Structures are given as structure tokens and as C-alpha cells.
Image (cartoon, grey):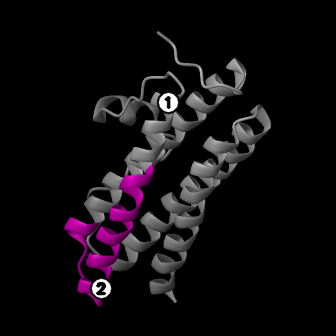
Amino acid sequence: MAVNLQGLKDNARKTAITELQSCMNDAASLSMALKQAHWNVKGPNFIAIHELFDAVKARLDPQIDAMAERVQQLDGVAVGTVEEVAKATKLKPYPTDLTKSADHIREISARLREYGARVREAIDTTDEAGDADTADILTAASQQADKDLWFIESHLE
């Protein structure tokens, strides 16, 4: 039985589900890339970068959960299996042969930048469709992605 939140048009609900799922796919892909980098990073400032990657992942994962829960509130089905995320993410596959910290920083930065851009598109789309609550969830994710990109890219200076 559909709940259909009061005051939210069907188009807004469907648009929000689609946008949230797309952002979840990219966020889940990014989360696993961060773990891949965390496990394999070597070089100067190892411990700082190793811990930074884990800290960024720790801030990202609750945002994925918030997006998935919003999908449920909108009567959708949140899909987050590794197989489905791998098929649906717009982020390119993370290289598995990297060890140098600078290489991991560049690769993670590129994905964070792309994820941030994708989330900003979804903010506009959901807001225009009439779902300000979903836009707020995505705005929080965007703000954190921007801050984490700054933290990570600062290691390249």
C-alpha cells in the first residue's frame, strides 16, 4: 500500500526516487573506492591519508543511508547491492593497481568532484519537481562532499 506523503505530487515523488537512487549508486561506488584507497595507500604522510580516507567514508555512509531511507519514505525501493551499484554508477571504476598516496588522492578527488556535481544536479531537479525535503538531504551531502574534496585535495599542494 502506497503511503504517498501529503503535499507531494506523484511526479515529485517519482523524480526524487530516481535522483536519490542515482546519487546512492555514485555514493556507494565512492565509498568502496575510499576503502580501496585506504587499504592500499603508501607513501609520505601515510597515516594521515590512510585515516583521512576512512574519515571521509565514515561521513559518506550515513548520507547513503539517509538517501535510502528517503526513497522508502517516498514509497520506492532502495537498491544498493554491489552488483546493481556496479551496473548503475556513473563513476568510472577505481584502479586497483595504485599504491602511491598522490595517485590515490588524485583518483579519490576526481570521484568526489564528479559525485558532488551529480548531487548538485539532483538538488536542482528535486527542488524543481517540488520535493524540498529531498533537496535538503542532497544539499547536506553536497556540502560534505565539497568539504571532503577540499580536505583531500589539500594534500596535493
Name the residue carrying label 2: 48
Which element is circle 1 on? helix
Question: Does the magenta run of residues contain 123?
Answer: no
- Percent across and percent down for residue 39 are 20, 66
Which is nearer the eye, 42 or 28? Answer: 28
Kind of residue at disc 1: Gln
Quick check: 57 above or below 53? above
Give me the C-alpha separation between circle 2 and circle 1: 38 Å
Q: Nearer the viewer, mark 2 or mark 1?
A: 1
Extreme residue in the top direction:
1
Give the image location of residue 69, x and y in percent: 43, 37
Q: Is residue 13 left or right of residue 129?
A: left
Q: Residue at x 71, y 27 (%)?
A: 7
N-terminal label among 2 and 1: 2
Q: Is residue 4 above or below residue 64?
A: above
Q: Based on the displayed image, in which of its 4 quarters is residue 131 positioned?
A: top right
Report which quarter residue 20 is drawn in: top right
Q: Is residue 44 magenta?
A: yes
122 sits to left or right of 80: right
Q: What residue is at 73 percent from the left and 38 percent from the top?
A: 125
Q: Of helix, strand and loop, which mostly describes the magenta segment?
A: helix
Residue extent of the magenta highlight: 38-63
